[in-house]
Amino acid sequence: MEEEIRLMKGNEAIAHAAIRYGADGYFGYPITPQSEVLETLAELRPWETTGMVVLQAESEVSAINMVYGGAATGKAVMTSSSSPGVSLKQEGVSYLAASELPALIVNVMRGGPGLGTIQPSQADYFQATKGGGHGDYHLIVLAPATVQEMADFVGLGFDLAFKYRNPTLILADGIVGQMMEKVVLPPQRPRRTEDEIRLQCPWAACGRLDRNHRNVVTSLELDSAKMEVNNHRFQATYRRIEENEVRFQEYYTEDADYLIVAFGSVARICLKAIEDARAAGVKIGLLRPITLWPFPYKEIERLSNQVKGILTVELNAGQMVEDVRLGANGKVPVHHFGRMGGIVPNPGEITDALTSHFSVNI
């Protein structure tokens, strides 16, 4: 398949991009609002074309453990779910991180807590960026704002996961998963051969060139001293990721007097609010974190030296705002505006929040 332009949902773009990346396997379970990922893969039947395995597991717990098994052999494997389903996967995600296994996980967020609503949310920010499961670990977290990024971040997510031997999470809100936009799909990449996997992944269970021997892949270490050594190695990896993989976009920040920080689809709504504010003579800028972990703390600090105040806009009760406050380091006031329960703010609500917090006339 060559590069192709299509109109599709964000969830559908994930499925198409996974096939075109040359992914070896997908293991998932349906849950709104991400079910189209599995449904699209089932419709496209990649096992007949690229050899990609697609399996609907009996549960989210089964799916993440199938990912663990596939990743342990050096395969490019992935899963997707939505908020309650990702909660069920957390033990397996921790095992992946502790075993230093590359994998791609997709969370198309819905409102919570509990079963909540099937409407969009960004309330899994803490779960994604602070670990979610047990132990001291991090996931690389990518936050798409467009259907194009849903497709692009599949390849980027796999590449980062293999580069650092660490799981990558695509954290998308339900709006991005369900909306339709034009997307440029990448050309088809061939799946790696078994010999290529052995050469690229010598750590994998089948990574040794001598096929009569196998590496042991496990997250278990009963010797506390050795487990501390493992943890120091994990933390060194995280420091390298923080140094090299921070991604973000800036809009109208050169002359901004105030700053909005928002991610995902909400950042797009904020851009309209910023245009309205600038039309009224109020200079607002936007910082959109693309990597939620590692978070762009240095960029927040730099902009804090310029602006008079910062507003975070989120579909939650205030989660990313904590990281923004850490980055601002008390230099300027940082406020939060959010909607919950699946309610999405309009640009007027955002300009009203700017007016309320910063006493500007918009």
Image (cartoon, helix red, strand yellow):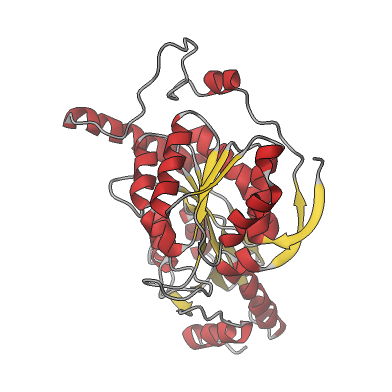
Say which quadrant the C terminus sits in: bottom right
- Residue at the spot 70% in from the left edge and 77% down from the top edge: 275
Q: In the image shown, does 212 or 358 lie closer to the viewer? A: 212
Relative to 114, 353 lies left or right: right
- Residue at the spot 65% in from the left edge and 76% down from the top edge: 274
- Residue at the spot 39% in from the left edge and 61% down from the top edge: 126
Measured from the top left, where is residue 172 in percent x and y?
55, 61
Q: In the image shown, does 242 or 138 lie closer to the viewer? A: 138
Measured from the top left, where is residue 238 in percent x and y?
41, 40
* In the depicted structure, whether residue 231 falls above or below residue 13: above
Q: Is residue 117 visible?
A: yes
* In the depicted structure, whether residue 197 falls above or below residue 13: above
Measured from the top left, where is residue 196 in percent x and y?
60, 21
Q: In the image shown, does 281 or 116 lie closer to the viewer? A: 116
Relative to 130, 306 lies left or right: right
* In the depicted structure, whether residue 102 falls above or below residue 29: above
Q: In the image shown, does 296 or 27 lie closer to the viewer? A: 27
> Looking at the rendering, which quadrant does residue 124 occupy?
bottom left
- Residue at the spot 37% in from the left edge and 72% down from the top edge: 113
Relative to 88, 176 lies left or right: right
Say which quadrant the N terminus sits in: top right
Counting labels gives: 0
Measured from the top left, where is residue 179 in percent x and y?
67, 68
Q: Is residue 324 visible?
A: no
